[in-house]
Amino acid sequence: MSSRTVRYGQNGIGDIGNGQYVQLDQTKEKHPSSNSFSYTVSFDPVLSAHNYSYVAGCTTECTLKRGTSST
């Protein structure tokens, strides 16, 4: 296999100070060299609640593409 790509994502509401909050959509991309992989990724913190009920989420996407051979 070639062209392996793994994307991890997180979204939610981030506190930027002074009572201001913004939507954070964060993505980390990795390119494993084998079919087995394990990564630790970190993101800026998001709020789970602050006077309101916010939703925080995460995503994982993995793409494997078969390479070509010249036989």
Image: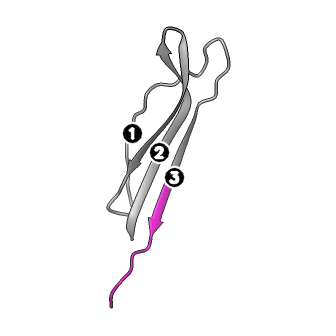
Q: How is the image coloured?
A: one colour
Q: Earlier in the sequence, mark 2 or mark 3?
A: 2
Neighbor class of circle 3 (other Cα within 10 Å; few <14, some 14-19, many 20+) is few
Residue sitting nearer the eye, 19 or 2: 19
- Give percent across and percent down for residue 58: 55, 39
Residue span colored magenta: 61-71
Q: Amino acid at mark 1?
A: Val
- Give percent across and percent down for residue 27: 46, 41
Compared to 56, does 9 lie above or below?
A: below
Residue at 61%, 14% in the rendered image: 50
Residue at 40%, 62% in the rendered image: 4
Residue at 56%, 29% in the rendered image: 12
Q: Quadrant of residue 56?
A: top right
Compared to 12, does 69 lie above or below?
A: below
Q: Earlier in the sequence, mark 2 or mark 1?
A: 2
Tell me, for residue 41, which label it has, or none: 1
**Residue located beneath label 3 in the image:** 61
- Give percent across and percent down for residue 41: 39, 39
